[in-house]
Image: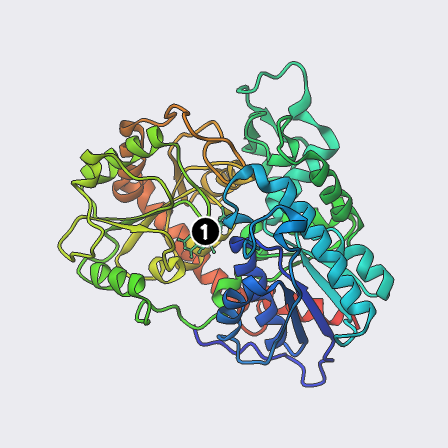
Amino acid sequence: MEMDSSSTNPKQPHPHFVVIPWPATSHMIPILDVACLLAAHGARVTVINSPANAPLIQSRLAAADHEITLTTIPFPAAAESGIPDGCERVDHLPSPSMLPAFFSAAMKFGDAVSRHFRHRRSPRPDCIVAGISHTWAQSMAREMGVPCFIFQGFCAFSLLCCELLHAHKPHESAAISPDEPFVVPALPPPFDACCRLTARQVPLQFLPDCPVPDRMREYREFELAVDGIVVNSFEEMEHDAVSRLAAVTGKKVFAVGPVSLSRRAPSLATADTTARRCAAWLDAKKEKSVIYVSFGSAGRMPPAQLTQLGKALVSCPWPVLWVIKGAATGEDIANNTDEEGDVASQCLVVRGWAPQVAILSHGAVGGFVTHCGWGSTLESVAAGVPMVTWPFTAEQFVNERLVVDVLRIGASVGATRPTGGMMMAGGEEEAEVGTEQVRRALESLMNGGVEGEERVKRVKELKAMAHAALEKGGSSYMNLDKLIRSVV
Ligand code: UDP
C-alpha cells in the first residue's frame, strides 16, 4: 500500500528515539517497522543491536523512506557467555537449554549499551523503546533522565489478560485441574463472555514449569516500571482492550499497527528464489483456493503431530502451501508433496523461511492455518484472510479466543494443550489433534457455508479498518503522533 505517513503537523518536533529490538526474529520484524513509522512521522531514530543481526535490520530499514541510524555493539563472546559465536538471536539457539545463558548474555549486552551512552558515543536519546526482555533498558533510561517504553509482542487483549492473571491468579486455584477451563476474571464485554482458558494454556510466565522463572520475574518488574507500552495492533479491532490496559496498568498505551502495513505493498516478485517459487505456484491457482499453513518463526510440531497434520493436508481438496521448520515428514506424506515448485502440484512445501506477508496478500490464498502468534494473526487480518487456529504456546491460546470467539474470523482446530514452540520440550509427544479433526477445521475454513461466508465478510471489514488505521488521521496514525509528542 502506498500511504502518506508523513506527520500531520509540519511543526512536529523531531525527538530522538533509540529503538532496541529484543533479538528474536519475530520481535525484530515488528519493532523495526515501528522504527520506520517513527522516522516517517518525523522522529530521529537510532536502532541498537549486535553485529550478527545487522543484515536483517538493514534489510528491514532499507524499505524506509527516511534515514535511520543503525549502531551495532558487540554481543558477549562465546568464551564469556557459553553461546556459540555469531548466535545472537534467541530463535537461532541450537538448544532450548541455552536459554538461561542467552538471557544472561543479553544482560551483559545491556551493560555494553549503557556504557556506550555513558561515554556519549551516540547522541542522547529523548526516549528509549526497548523490546520485551531488555529489562536493563529501564535503568539506562532513568540514568539518562528519559522515558522508557516497552514494545510488546502481544496484543492489548492478551496483555490485559496477563494483567488480570497477575492480579487474580485464577490459574493457581487448587480447585482447578490443568484441563478445567476457568474464566479470566474482570474482563470487560465483549471479552467477558468468552475468555476461558485452562491452567495449561496460560502464557509462559504463569506456568509452574517455566524454564526461565528468574528472568520472567525481572521481566515483570520491567513491565511495571516502564513509562508506556507500544503494541502492534489497532484500536478498532481490540474493542476496549487498549483503554482497559491503560487503566489497569496506569500507563500510556499506544496501538500503532498493523505495522506490517507501513511497508510498500509486499511482492513475491523479488530476487529471492523461495519467493519466486511461491509466486509461480500461487499464480497457477484459483482465487481464494489455497490454504497457507505456517506456525511462525520457531514453531516446530512433534513428529507424530506433523504426520497427522500432513495426512489432512495432502488429502484435502484445496491446494496447500505448507511451511515447515526443521523436522522431515513421513514418506507417505513426502510422496504427495512437492518442494521444487511444480506449478501443477497440489501441496507445495517450503522448508525454512517463507515470505509470509507477501504470500498472505496473494489473491490465491483463501485461508491460513496459524499457531496464533500475534504477528501472524495480525498479518492475516491485514490481508483479509480467515484462519484455522492452532495455538502452540505463550499467549497463543489467548489470541485464539480473540480470533475465534470475539472477532469470529477463525475456526479452531481444537488443540487444548501446549505443544512444540521454542521454549517447550516437544520431542516424543503424542499427537493431540488427529487427521479427521484437522480436516473438519479445513472444511469449515474453506467450505463453511453461511458461517464461513460471514467469517470472510468480517475479516474483510477488519482488513479495511486496519488499512484505515494507518492512513492519515486514522487511529494508529494519530497514536504514532501522540507517542512522539509524549516525549517532548
Ligand atoms: N515469518 C515469516 N516467514 C516464516 C515464518 C515467520 O515471514 O517462514 C514472520 C511472520 O510474517 C511474522 C513473524 O515471522 O511476522 C512470526 O511472528 P509470530 O508472532 O506470528 O510468531 P512467533 O514466531 O513469535 O511464534
Residue lying furthest bottom: 10
Eyeballing the image, is 346 above or below 283?
above
Q: Nearer the viewer, residue 389 or 106?
A: 106
Q: Position of residue 246 (x, y in %)?
A: 72, 50
Amino acid type indicated by mark 1? Ser
When the figure is inspected, residue 389 is found, relative to residue 77, above or below; the finding is: above
Q: Is disc 1's CB within 8 Å of ligand 1? A: yes
Residue drawn at x 73%, y 57% is 110
Image coordinates of residue 132 in percent, x first then y, are 66, 51
- Disc 1 secondary structure class: helix
Image side of residue 240 versus residue 381, left or right? right
Q: Residue furthest left?
A: 344
For this rendering, which residue is in front, 287 or 264? 264
Q: Quadrant of residue 430?
A: top left
The residue where tag 1 is placed is: 376
Image-based side of 158 in relation to 443, left or right: right
